[in-house]
Image (cartoon, rainbow, N blue to C red):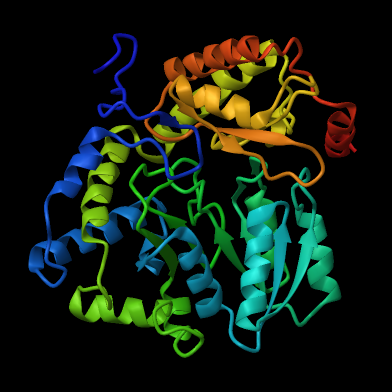
């Protein structure tokens, strides 16, 4: 099952590659780990929870002793809501930096929570910059927290969290980072980037399966979070205190998912940690983007802002190009791509993460070329409005 040119196994069960930002293609060893049952109260499983927490903290580098890791049942959005509700006091106010669907989701979450907030909406194409953050914070002294998306997967923009952090703390405020699709492949070391808390999930760059997220936060913030949460089940302080006291999750944990995640964490370490994982994903991106551009596709972003997580391409202007048909033909060839989320022009996305390497990405490009030929599409060039919109980046 291992191709001679790569050390990664092909999906043993014959399933398509998931070219998405998670859930993603996992190794057979990760899947196999879910075949055994575990008692959530048993010492063996409590040891697994301890290993999960300490292994994730080790990815922070120097300074990690000031932080703790709190896993939380549910999808990544559950953990984002838990972070926002637990660390932004009810009388606090947040500045949400949005340049896509996930920044706007944080704003919507704060609306549900009844937390005061303002939004810097940069649209689909532009990253929020440090000088903009500094100006907003200077103009509004009531803002207590800044909420930033590390990698905005609706567009593929890798946002400049380091300069955002510098602006936030220069103004005496606190930063919360949604690193859902970046943590584990893009460094977020606390010695380099200051923040109070960040959130990610099992089924992203660590290459586990869906079922829980995790919040990594300063212990001082965890202690101060008592009583902030609107929710019994999403209370990060309560989950943290209970885990530290008993070693157990407060409510039924996703035992099989935790077992799979530990296998994924060990593989992550063996690959070279964040640097090694990020290097493979970056090579995946570069090979795939170069190939798609040779076919005539245009990426939403210029290279400066491309993340190694997922890349957005404009749909061709050719009348014979129909995305749903393109999707199905790509799936028939063994690749599931991701619909676009841009608001102005039609697009689709191709993920670079998961159990894939550059050899797989070359197959993706070959499948795209074959699919265009089958559809009778003679040009993959986007409509003029797409390039006009993209020109905003240069401006």
Q: Is residue 225 visible?
A: yes
Q: Quadrant of the C terminus?
A: top right
In the image, is 84 to the left or to the right of 15? Answer: right
Toward which corner of the image does residue 243 lie, by quadrant? Answer: bottom left
Q: Does 217 sit left or right of 293 as displayed?
A: left
Q: Along the line of sight, which residue is nearer the eye, 200 or 332? A: 332
When the figure is inspected, residue 18 is found, relative to residue 366, above or below; the finding is below
Residue at 83% from the left image edge and 34% from the top image edge: 390
Task: In the displayed orientation, state which residue is furthest to the left.
Answer: 43
x and y percentages locating residue 311 in the rendered image = 62, 33
Residue at 42 percent across and 22 percent down: it is 357
Task: Find residue 246 and report its horizontal and vertical position in percent.
Answer: 19, 79
Above or below: residue 10 compared with residue 213: above
The residue closer to the viewer here, 97 or 142, is: 97
Marker count (numbered): 0
Is 385 placed left or right of 333 in the picture?
right
Judge whether residue 165 can be spotted in this image: no
Residue drawn at (72%, 13%), measured in percent from left and top? 377
Pick the quarter of the image with the N terminus: top left
Which residue is depicted at the point 72% across and 57% down? 98
| Place of residue 202 in the rendered image (x, y in percent of width and height, measured from the top left) | 37, 52
């Amino acid at each position: 099952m291992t191709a001679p040119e790569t050390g990664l196994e092909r999906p043993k069960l014959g399933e398509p590659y998931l070219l998405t930002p998670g859930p993603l293609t996992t190794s057979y060893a990760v899947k196999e780990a879910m075949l055994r049952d575990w008692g959530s109260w048993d010492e063996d499983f409590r040891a697994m929870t301890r290993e999960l927490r300490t292994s994730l903290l080790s990815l922070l580098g120097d300074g990690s002793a000031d932080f703790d890791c709190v896993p939380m049942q549910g999808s990544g959005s559950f953990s984002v809501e838990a972070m926002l509700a637990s660390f932004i006091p009810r009388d606090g106010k947040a500045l949400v930096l949005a340049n896509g669907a996930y920044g706007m989701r944080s704003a919507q979450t704060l609306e549900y929570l009844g937390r005061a907030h303002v939004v810097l909406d940069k649209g689909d194409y532009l990253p929020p910059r440090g000088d903009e953050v500094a100006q907003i914070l200077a103009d509004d002294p009531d803002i207590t927290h800044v909420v930033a998306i590390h990698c905005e997967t609706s567009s593929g923009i890798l946002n400049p969290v380091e300069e955002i952090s510098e602006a936030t703390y220069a103004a005496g405020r606190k930063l919360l980072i949604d690193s859902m699709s970046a943590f584990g492949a893009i460094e977020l070391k606390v010695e380099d980037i200051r923040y109070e808390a960040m959130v990610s999930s099992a089924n992203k760059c660590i290459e586990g399966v869906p079922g829980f997220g995790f919040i990594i936060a300063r212990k001082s913030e965890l202690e101060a979070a008592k009583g902030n949460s609107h929710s019994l089940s999403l209370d990060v302080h309560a989950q943290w205190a209970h885990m530290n006291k008993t070693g157990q999750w407060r409510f039924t944990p996703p035992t099989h998912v935790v077992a799979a995640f530990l296998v994924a964490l060990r593989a992550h370490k063996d690959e070279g940690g964040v640097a090694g994982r990020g290097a493979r994903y970056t090579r995946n991106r570069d090979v795939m983007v170069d190939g798609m551009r040779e076919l005539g596709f245009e990426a939403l972003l210029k290279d400066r802002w491309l993340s190694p997580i997922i890349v957005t391409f404009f749909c061709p202007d050719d009348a014979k190009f129909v995305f749903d048909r393109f999707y199905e033909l790509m799936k028939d060839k063994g690749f599931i791509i991701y619909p676009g989320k841009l608001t102005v022009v039609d697009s689709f996305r191709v993920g670079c993460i998961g159990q894939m390497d550059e050899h797989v990405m070359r197959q993706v490009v070959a499948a795209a070329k074959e699919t265009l030929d089958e559809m009778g599409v003679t040009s993959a060039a986007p409509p003029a409005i797409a390039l006009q919109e993209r020109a905003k980046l240069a401006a």
